Amino acid sequence: MGLRDVQRAQEPRLSDTKRVFSQAQRSLLTCVINRIIPPKDNMPGAGSLGIAGFIENVAANTTSLTRLFNEGLAQIAVAAGPDFTSAFESLSDTAKDDLLRSIEAVNPTFFDQLVLQTYNGYYTNPEVFKLIGYELPKLAPPGAHPALLDESLLDHQRNREPFWKKV
């Protein structure tokens, strides 16, 4: 699956959202987040899952996040070289990691948000749930009541001497 395939896969998800990134920024973001969570064994990379769309949705929520991500992506593009549309993608993995470390040093607020939102998008993705064997808890049917607490579990605590002072 190439970068163009990933971009096409992202398009339906982005069509219902407010777009705050250009196509070049989306491509760059996809490559960047594939370095934050790269593909390994049977696990896809964050960029390959379309997490760039998730991040764009988050960035669209507030003007401060939109600005933060736009400025951060611009810093990465400029640092990658003159042909910013493909410069980052053409770097070696080591060079990409070095560049991202330098961005982290000069713009830690952006980098923290980038990592946070990449992890949020990745680890809430249904495909990742399936691959790591996580299942969402089953919802109780309408009108059902949860099982009551076994109050005998509290006996030990209830029989303890108070550990506070009465004031």
Image (cartoon, helix red, strand yellow):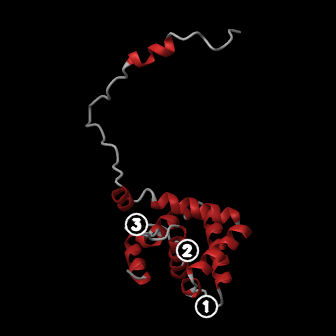
Residue type (three-letter) at the residue carrying disc 3: Met
The label nearer to you, 2 versus 1, is 2
Instruction: Tell which residue pokes out farthest to the front in this image.
Output: 41
- Gap between marks 1 and 3, in whole Å? 31 Å
Label 1 Cα neighbours within 10 Å, binned few <14 / some 14-19 / many ≥20: few
Residue bearing the label numbered 2: 32
Residue 115, horizontal then vertical, whole percent? 58, 62
Checking the image for residue 143, the label placed there is: none
Q: Is residue 61 visible?
A: no
Checking the image for residue 83, the label placed there is: 1
Residue at x 50% of width, y 67% of height? 37
Residue type (three-letter) at the residue carrying disc 2: Val
Taking the image as shown, residue 134 lies to the left or right of residue 39, namely left
Using the rendered view, name the quadrant where residue 129 is placed: bottom left
Observer-nearest residue: 70 or 131?
131
Using the rendered view, name the quadrant where residue 163 is placed: top right
Depicted 158 relative to depicted 82: above or below? above
Residue 78, horizontal then vertical, whole percent? 67, 83
- Gap between marks 2 and 3, in whole Å? 17 Å
Q: In which quarter of the image is the N terminus?
A: bottom left
The label nearer to you, 2 versus 3, is 3
Taking the image as shown, residue 142 lies to the left or right of residue 98, namely left
Q: Is mark 1 on a helix, strand or loop?
A: loop
Residue 81, horizontal then vertical, whole percent? 65, 87
Taking the image as shown, residue 98 lies to the left or right of residue 128, namely right
Residue bearing the label numbered 3: 43
Q: Quadrant of the C terminus?
A: top right
Label 3 Cα neighbours within 10 Å, binned few <14 / some 14-19 / many ≥20: some
Residue type (three-letter) at the residue carrying disc 1: Asp
The answer to the question of whether label 1 and label 3 lie on touching residues, with beta carbons closer than 8 A, is no
